[in-house]
Amino acid sequence: MFGNRFRLFRVFGIEIRADLSWFVVVALFTWSLARQVFPAGQLAPGLTETTYWAMGIVGAALLFASIVLHELGHALVARRHGLPIRGITLFIFGGVAEMTDEPPTAKAEFLVAVAGPAVSVVLGVAFLVAGTAGTLAGWPAPLVAVAVVVGWMNLALVLFNMVPAFPLDGGRVLRSMLWQWRGDLRWATRVTSAIGSALGLGLIGLGVLMAIGANNLIGGVWMALIGMFVRSAARMSYQQLLLRRSLEGEPVARFMETRPVTVPRSISVAELVSDYVYRHHFKMFPVVDGDRLVGCVTTRAVRELPREDWDRQSVGALADSCGPENTVPPDLDAMRALSLMSRTGTSRLLVAEGDHLLGILSLKDLLKFFSLKMELEPGSGAGRVQRPAG
């Protein structure tokens, strides 16, 4: 879902990151507030352009702070129910608390889902109360206007998020109810994801009508983009659940390549690139000393080494040692291995016992198994899974 991400800060032990697309929407939103929303409002008319820009910057900052608090609401409640939180990422359509597992019960799903909107309701009411109190107390008009606008935007965020279409918060609430009713998480996810996909199509159609019929090109394009995101996220969420159910309880030994390509620690980095990377096209190779596993070397490490040092540096000196971030035992649950890949951003893991290499587990092989399994289960609705390279 995300491209390059930048760490902003940590709060309650949760890392807050921003996708590159977030910086674009911050700039657009600031411009919209400064040039359209505040000048056209009745709370602070006739101010200077500089003042409106200052209001736009403060308003955008408060709104995105509200989004972070909204996602923290989800994350903290999820953590109380034992769900690991990878972090919170801000991106073009708002923010997302990245949970690495499904809630254990329907009740937990409900509580996690409503936590974010509850925070937004509190923030919205608080900002509106502050704006009303500020008006009565004679606060400067720009402060009152910013408080009122941010308050209404928080409440608008709640209204949109509570639409009962997965993966919106309202869709998660509906999923928890259906899950509680039927006791079937897969069925509940399929139903709410279908609603989310239909909502996405509706938003795309509305965007086209706005762009063509209402002569609102920017608003129409924005609405269509939101629709495409909702539709894609709904389908992806259902596939992720099916993938999780397919891999849970399966050991990584079932999926590993038992005859992996290994690299001697004594060769140079230049030989690694010419004889292994260009030939096999993998992003990570096990590094061995005879029959003993000593670590792994990645193309990322090679890129960070100056080109003039490739002939002088040995692979052994460049290799990372074996550890829990790159090495798993053969009896580990495959779903836990997939979660490790997701958390570390790698597509290949060493499978070893002590310093004895047993094989390589690749993301491509896990997804290939999932795709084949779905083809053999009529009516799964999963479709094909795109297989990444490497």
Image: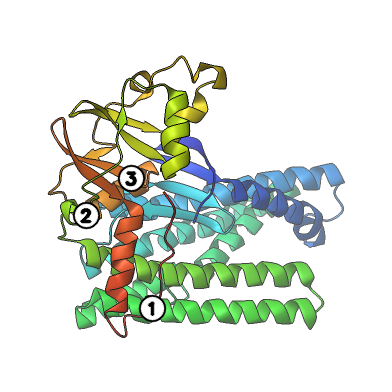
Given residues 295 and 247, the one toward you in this image is 295
User: Whole-Å distance between the Cαs marked 2 and 1?
Assistant: 27 Å
Which secondary structure lies at badge 2?
helix
Left or right: where does residue 388 sit relative to residue 131? left
Q: Residues within 10 Å of mark 3 (few under 14, many from 20)?
A: many
User: Whole-Å distance between the Cαs marked 2 and 3?
Assistant: 13 Å
Q: Residue at x 79, y 73 (%)?
A: 216
Q: Which residue is mark 3?
A: 348
Given residues 168 and 274, the one toward you in this image is 274
Which secondary structure lies at badge 3?
strand
| Residue 115, percent from left and from top | 37, 59
For the residues carrying marks 2 and 1, which lies nearer the camera in this image? 2
| Residue 33, percent from left and from top | 73, 55
The answer to whether any part of residue 140 appears in the image is no
Amino acid carrying mark 1 in the image: Thr
Earlier-in-chain disc, 1 versus 3: 1
Amino acid carrying mark 3 in the image: Arg
Label of residue 192 in the image: 1
| Residue 328, percent from left and from top | 20, 41
Q: Marks 3 and 2: in contact by CB < 8 Å?
A: no
Amino acid carrying mark 2 in the image: Ala
Q: Where, by quadrant of the figure, is residue 288 drawn?
A: top left
Q: Which residue is mark 2?
A: 334
